[in-house]
Image: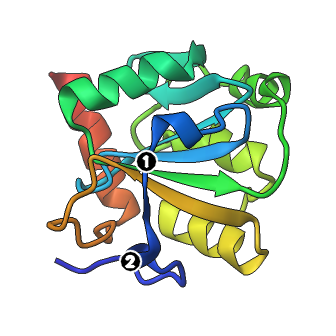
Amino acid sequence: MEVLNYEIDLTAILPFELHTFDSERCFLWVLYADKIPPHVGISSNNCYFSLKYNGKDEYLHVDNVLKLLEQKKIKTLLFELTETISAGSIAEHFSAYSKTKTGHITCLHPVKETLHCNNVQTLKELLSALNNAQRIGSVKGINIDDTFQGIIDYSLQDIHDRLRHLEDA
């Protein structure tokens, strides 16, 4: 298993603590951080957004997402972004999409457009671009334990294979 090799020190992951979590800030969410591929979402102003094979989440209250992550024990990384992006701005980018499409549209598309990183193809590239531009503050982990070794490297083909599997299920 090869771990992504961008320059974010995953050993510096802070444990998630609800009482110190500022859900008003902007976060890049990496759900299923231990799976190939992980799922990517974004939040700001207590509102979570993500594009999925069967639709999209828009303006979903962050508390509801956190409850789901805890209930299902989903390993998740939250990358706190140093910039402010309104929920309305995120929604504008998500409005162009209805769901993912195998071979064409992934969960990363509206997120990378929101973050003005249109040239990236994978989470690895997005995190590298954000890190190089010093746009990432802290990294918080939910359900991350000592067995977590980082986000596993994957290809675009892995993403589309997973989408195809979900669509065929």
Colour pattern: rainbow
Q: Which of the two marks, 2 or 1, is nearer to us in this view?
A: 1
Residue 37 lies, with reference to residue 105, above or below; the image says: below
What's the distance in space between the residues labelled 2 and 1, CA to CA?
Answer: 14 Å
User: What residue is shown with label 1?
Assistant: 16
Tell me if residue 55 can be seen. yes
Q: Nearer the viewer, residue 4 or 121?
A: 4
Q: Amino acid at mark 1?
A: Phe
Q: Position of residue 69 (x, y in %)?
A: 32, 31
x%, y% of residue 64?
A: 45, 16
Element class at badge 1? loop
> From the viewer's perspective, is 84 left or right of 134?
right
Position of residue 7 measured from the top left corner of the image (x, y, whole percent): 54, 84
**Residue ID at (27%, 55%):** 144
Question: Where, quadrant-wise, is the C terminus in this rendering?
Answer: top left
Q: Is residue 153 left or right of residue 128?
A: left
Q: Residue furthest front?
A: 19
Q: Nearer the viewer, residue 18 or 80?
A: 18
Label 2's element?
helix
> Given contact means CB atoms under 8 Å apart, are the residues at marks 2 and 1 in contact?
no
Locate residue 165 relative to residue 49 in the image: left or right: left
Dot 2, how many residues are within 10 Å of its Cα: few (below 14), some (14-19), or many (20+)?
A: few
Q: Residue at x 20, y 28 (%)?
A: 72
Question: From the image, which quarter does the N terminus lie in?
Answer: bottom left
* Dot 1 crowding, Cα within 10 Å, few <14, some 14–19, many 20+: some
Q: Tell me where residue 137 appears, x and y as whole percent.
A: 68, 64
Res. 120 in view = no
Q: Earlier in the sequence, mark 2 or mark 1?
A: 2
Q: Amino acid at mark 2?
A: Thr
Residue at left 67%, top 74%? 131
Instruction: Return the residue at label 2.
Output: 11
